[in-house]
Amino acid sequence: MKAYSRFSKKILLSLFTFIALTNIVACNSSQEESEATVDYNSLPLEQLIEKAKKDGEVHSVGMPDTWANWIETWQDIKGIYNIKHTDLDMSSAEEIALFKEEGKKGTKDIGDVGQQWGPVAEKEGVTLKYKTSYWDEIPSWAKDDDGDWIVAYYGTISIITNNKIVSNPPKSFADILNGDYKVTIGDVSTAAQAQHAILATAYAMGGSIDNLQPAYDFWKKLAEQGRLDIGDTSVARIESGEISVCLLWDYNALGYRDNAVKNNPNASFTINIPSDGSVQSGYSTIINKNAPNKAAACLAREHILSDKGQINLAKGYATPIRNVKLPAEVQAKRIDASQYGKNIRQVDYQKWTKVCQELITYWQENIIPALH
């Protein structure tokens, strides 16, 4: 009788344990499903902040401290919300591949990708939709229809000139054509910056994304004149005086200039947006659909698009996507707003991938052989 009683108790204990574990698993499963189906766009900001604080951390990719002054944004998020941050630097393609490869076991929350990669991330099904409270202030070209990607900042192809070498800094592609100095563009076969500079040349010379021939003629002429430099466009070469005139995104040009002057107070550079034509392109935040800290990722995007977040990016020389008033000391380091005129075009990224491949082929077959 006692043996039976002990046996019965063991069965009952096992049964209660099984039921308890089943309830815990069901509860956790229900919680995970609930979190996966949260519509973060419908949450009041106060609730989003509360959820983000519970997350307590946010893990980014491609958003290191030194790029576009991300460091101040992460410091803000830590200081205001007590949310810790880590970053793993990688390319746009690598970010999307990581989100897709990890799937439901995602370890990263938010990434920063080149504008052309936003639609790719959406197509791959790795993005969480979150518009932020600033949605109506974002230009239509800088976002998709429901917040899978949003451009936070952008750059414009510019001309940086070493004033110690060239006394009359070019203000346009036409000025460059009439000059006698070498022009550095970088490796057109691999560098997106160089490829966009070719597109800017096309618009300046009367062409378009559908007609790059005017740009080809321009650069072939420089190559035949011995004026084309396809070496790298690094700050080290600019500081050393190896580069006379160079085509760069304005945020790179501004950063390189200030760095060069910091290291050599006698250095002097002029940066102009080519008046006869240029192109703009941005960087988009993408939130991982399987982010372990979804609320924190959404709050990070919210802060990035806030006035403070946009000013942080401007301190890193990028142009904020929102029309925010910049502090005088920040504006003073930038190119005068009057240079960003009507001849600046947005890039049609539905066409650009195919056009870019054709550009690379033409460059390798026709421009490189003309170098001497």
Image: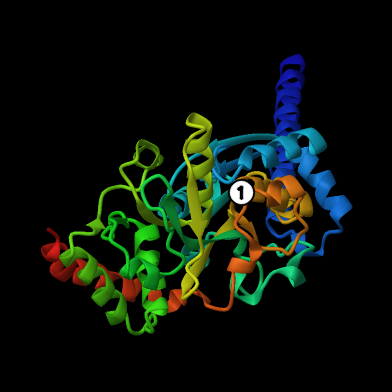
Extreme residue toward the front, this view = 167
- The local crowd at label 1, few if under 14, some if 14 to 19, many if 20 or more residues have their Cα within 10 Å, is many
Task: Name the foreground residue: 327 vs 95.
Answer: 327
Q: Is residue 29 visible?
A: no
Q: Is residue 62 left or right of residue 235?
A: right
Residue under label 1: 291
Q: Residue at x 75, y 69 (%)?
A: 137
Task: Name the foreground residue: 167 vs 173.
Answer: 167
Q: Is residue 202 left or right of residue 281?
A: left
Q: Residue at x 69, y 53 (%)?
A: 301
Q: Where's residue 305, x and y in %?
A: 72, 56
Task: Name the foreground residue: 175 vs 187.
Answer: 175
Quarter where residue 226 is shown:
bottom left
Q: Where's residue 202, x and y in %?
A: 36, 77
Here the colouring is rainbow
Q: Secondary structure at mark 1?
A: loop
